[in-house]
Amino acid sequence: MLRSQQRRFCQFFVIISFMEHKKLYRYTSNKEGVFSAGKRLLPESLGDEALEARKWMPKPQLPEGDYRFFLTEKGKNQYERTLFKVHQKYLSNFECEEIDPQKIGNVVYEDEWQVVIKKEIPKTIKEVGFDFSWDEKKVWQLDIPVTEMDITELIWHFDIPFLWEGGGIYNLTPQDVIDDKERHISEYERTMKADLVHPIDIMENKGRWLILDGLHRLMKASILGMKKVKVRIIPRDKIPEITI
């Protein structure tokens, strides 16, 4: 069992008494967590029904940040009896991943229904990444021409842990998936389902091209032996139009 811990957030403390969980679960819809997808895509007509269906689940008061939610076994059973039935009305392609609690990382909140971790960005990603958060849908809406680029200008992404598995955060590189598809079968299958009809959206950042959207398409193109890929080069003056 994990010991009681005290973690500092900004200028105040959150006290967390960790419980013992043999298993945790994460539901996704089209690879996105069901709680974020459910909130983002919730039809207005189902608002009251969804609110009623999830009233059993406490909403932790956490500082602003990026978090991931896991269900305990009790929470999973309750979710399937309640909110899942609402989600089935407008979400699709559900998956339920069983997670080892010892591998989920920085736990910041826990109760009988859920465990929450804060997504910590590794130093390697901070060194190469953008200094802003963006909405992929806003990127897609930009009217930018499509061009071609040598794949060699982008494959540096393969050595950076932009992916994750097993409940962890940013713990998997694209090259790991490409080199051992059997071990990382879920990400490999997701990669091979990527639609190369759509271009890869990129932006100049710190002296090289960085992907905004389309990493799995780049991986698939490489696996297929393609020498060039379709891209849209997003100007940096578009940043205000795509930030969250």
Image (cartoon, rainbow, N blue to C red):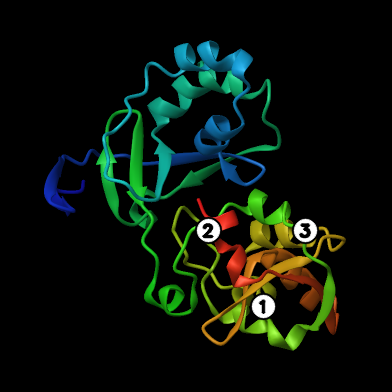
Q: How far apart are labels 3 and 2 at the CA level? A: 34 Å
From the viewer's perspective, is residue 86 above or below residue 93? above
Which element type, helix, strand or loop, lies under badge 1? helix
- 64, 171: nearer the viewer: 64
From the viewer's perspective, is residue 73 above or below residue 126? above
**Residue receiving disc 3:** 143
Amino acid at the residue labelled 2: Glu
Q: Contact (CB < 8 A) between labels 3 and 2?
A: no
From the viewer's perspective, is residue 118 above or below residue 113? below
Q: 87 left or right of 124?
A: right
For the question of whether residue 60 can be seen, the reply is yes
Which sits earlier in the primary sequence, circle 3 or circle 2?
A: 3
- Residue at figure coordinates x 84%, y 75% from the top left: 147
The picture places residue 201, in percent across and down from the top left corner, at: 70, 66
Which sits earlier in the primary sequence, circle 1 or circle 3?
A: 3
**Residue receiving disc 2:** 165
The picture places residue 178, in percent across and down from the top left corner, at: 69, 74
Amino acid at the residue labelled 1: Asp
- Residue at figure coordinates x 43%, y 78% from the top left: 124
The picture places residue 41, in percent across and down from the top left corner, at: 61, 31
- Residue at figure coordinates x 82%, y 60% from the top left: 198
Q: 111 left or right of 129?
A: left
For the question of whether residue 182 can be seen, the reply is no
Disc 3 residue crowd, few under 14, some 14–19, many 20+, Cα 10 Å: few
Question: What is the quadrant of residue 4 in the picture?
Answer: top left
- Residue at figure coordinates x 34%, y 54% from the top left: 102
Amino acid at the residue labelled 3: Asp
- 177, 68: nearer the viewer: 68
Disc 2 residue crowd, few under 14, some 14–19, many 20+, Cα 10 Å: some
**Residue receiving disc 1:** 179
Which sits earlier in the primary sequence, circle 2 or circle 1?
A: 2
From the viewer's perspective, is residue 99 above or below residue 110? below
